[in-house]
Image (spheres, grey):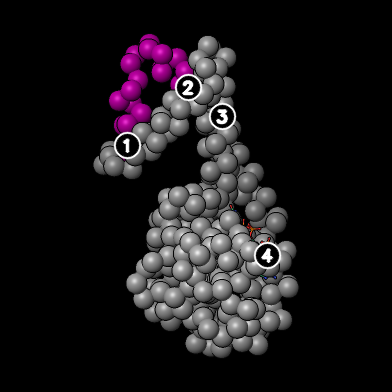
Amino acid sequence: MNIGFIGTGNMGAAIIEALSGMEGITLYGVNRTRSKLEELAARTGLIPCGDVRELTEKSDFVVLAVKPQQVGEVWPAMVPALSSDKCMISIAAGLTLESLQQSIGHACPVIRVMPITPVLVKEGVTAVCLDDKTLTQEQKDAVQRIFSPSGDVHIVAENLFDVFTALIGSGPALLFHLMETLIESGVELGIERAAASRMVKKLFRGAGIMAEQSEQHISLLKEMSIAPAGTTNAALAHFERTAIRGNIMDAIRKAYERSIELG
Ligand SMILES: NC(=O)c1ccc[n+]([C@@H]2O[C@H](COP(=O)([O-])OP(=O)(O)OC[C@H]3O[C@@H](n4cnc5c(N)ncnc54)[C@H](OP(=O)(O)O)[C@@H]3O)[C@@H](O)[C@H]2O)c1
């Protein structure tokens, strides 16, 4: 399987790194800044192409990994080299299947994908939209193989992409914000910043692994560490009285509404 990446920036490079060395996969790439492409090629075995047209001709799957506002520069070289047996995978946030299909003149099937930054450490959560009726079963299976080395892959219908974007796409920054707030709380109460930072990072990692590995519902895991009239209970009761849960749900809804506006 030949996979060509147009754009080897943060996301493109992370997906390529995860795929590098996999049997049966040949990776091609183009990037506006050539030096970035060549460094990546030296690290991963990716084959640099001269231009978008050459890359598209060589690839079974063409991954569009430039910024949404940069896609217009790509079409003139890409579209003439597309054919119905190829497949375009777009990771460009907000670009719908319909707009992508219009841009390429329905030249081949299109898959819309939404990765998140933890793909950089192969612990991503990636949404894959397989709504395009012209996709073959082989292409549907292949896209899951392409993204599974970067973390978990979920098939998400396009009408739920804005929900995924709000909940999971915004998720890393929301969790980093929470981590930062906990670190600041530790510092305020007397722990050195570096130590508070190490403690909070491990706390997230430990709780995340526990939640992932346990068969029990999250509510039961939470209950395990709450003693009546204890410290955790005091903090959680404050959360409930100040409607933190409702606030978080409203924040996700705000992100959802913004995603619809931008889309
Ligand atoms: N970062 C995220 O958290 C995230 C999450 C989900 C989806 N996405 C999507 O992923 C896509 C890429 O985002 P990113 O964060 O990886 O951006 P990025 O780091 O700016 O990468 C974009 C790359 O595309 C290259 N490029 C631009 N125009 C080009 C052209 N005409 N031909 C060839 N290469 C070109 C750029 O080259 P230069 O080296 O010259 O800049 C750059 O390396 C975006 O569409 C974004 O919506 C990102």
Closest to the camera, between mark 3 and mark 2, is 2
**Which residue position is annotated with label 4?**
33
Residue 222 magenta-highlighted: yes
**Which residue position is annotated with label 2?**
195
Residue 193 magenta-highlighted: no
First in sequence: mark 3 vs mark 1 = 3
- Find residue 215 and report its image quarter: top left
Q: Is mark 3 within 8 Å of ligand 1?
A: no
Q: Is residue 115 left or right of residue 51?
A: left
- Of all residues shown, which one is farthest toward the left? 215
Q: CA distance from mark 3 to mark 4?
A: 34 Å
**Which residue position is annotated with label 1?**
210
* Residue type (three-letter) at the residue carrying disc 2: Ala
Closest to the camera, between mark 2 and mark 4, is 4
Q: CA distance from mark 1 to mark 2?
A: 22 Å
Instruction: Find residue 180 and name its label.
Output: 3
Crowdedness near tag 1: few (<14), some (14–19) or many (≥20) residues, C-alpha within 10 Å: some
Provide the secondary structure element on which disc 2 rests. Answer: helix
First in sequence: mark 3 vs mark 4 = 4
* Residue type (three-letter) at the residue carrying disc 1: Met
First in sequence: mark 1 vs mark 4 = 4
Residue 203 locus on image (x, y percent): 41, 29
First in sequence: mark 3 vs mark 2 = 3
The quadrant of the picture occupied by the N terminus is: bottom left
Provide the secondary structure element on which disc 4 rests. Answer: loop
Whether pointer 2 and pointer 4 mark residues with C-beta atoms closer than 8 Å, the reply is no
